[in-house]
Image (cartoon, helix red, strand yellow):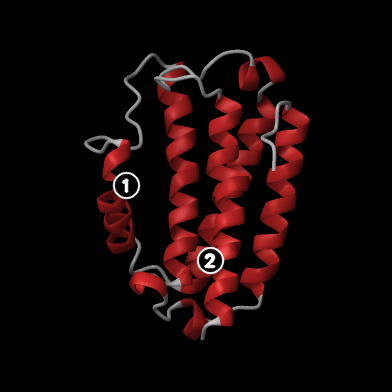
Amino acid sequence: MPAATTKAQLIAVCEKDYAKLATALAGIDTAIASQAFEDGITIKDIVAHRAHWIDLYLGWWADGQAGRTVHMPAEGYGWGDLKAYNALLRDRYAGLTWPEACARLAARHAALMAQLGELDDAALYAVPMVGGNGKWTAGRYAEAAGASHYRSALKFIRACLRNR
C-alpha cells in the first residue's frame, strides 16, 4: 500500500485502518486478549504498544516544534534498541486491563486525528519533520504510528485468533 501524500489521504487511511482494528478488538474477550501467543506477547500487549507509539509520534512533533531535542524512538534508546524498548513497554503496561488498553488506544487515536485535523498539507508533507533526523515527513511518521501500526496489529491479532 503506497504511503499517503496528503492530509486527506492520511486521515482517510488512519480512520479506515483504525475502524478495522476496533471492529476486531470488540470481538475479543479478556481471556483471549491476555493469552500469550508469539514470543509470549499478548493481544493486550500489542494494543497498549500501538497506543504508546502514537504518544511517541505526538511527542516527537511537539518537541520538534518547541525546539527541544527529539529522542527517537525514546530517550536513551536508538532504533537498534527496539526489542529492549518494546519489552520495557510490555512491562510498563502489564497492569492495564483489557478494557483500559482498548480505551487507551481509542483515546490516542482520537488525539492523533485531532492533531492531523489541525495541520495542513505543508506541515505534514512539505519538509522532513523537525527533529526527525532524516527525510521522513511528519505525515509519514503519523502514518507509521497510526495506520501502519493498526494494520500490523490486526495482522498479529488475526494470526493469534487462528492459532488458539
Relative height, residue 100 to residue 81 (above, below): below
Element type at marker 2?
A: helix
Foreground: 22 or 62?
Answer: 22
Q: CA distance from mark 2 to mark 1?
A: 18 Å
Left or right, 48 with reference to 4? left
Q: Amino acid at mark 1?
A: Leu
Left or right, 83 with reference to 21? left
Q: Residue at x 68, y 45 (%)?
A: 14
Please identify the residue farthest to the front as the structure is shown: 1
Relative height, residue 162 to residue 155 (above, below): below
Where does residue 9 sit, x and y in percent of width and height? Answer: 76, 34
Element type at marker 1?
A: helix
Task: Determine which residue is flagged by label 1.
Answer: 82
Q: Residue at x 56, y 73 (%)?
A: 159
Say which quadrant the N terminus sits in.
top right
Q: Amino acid at mark 2?
A: Phe
Where does residue 85 sit, x and y in percent of width and height? Answer: 29, 49
User: In the image, which disc is placed on residue 156?
Assistant: 2
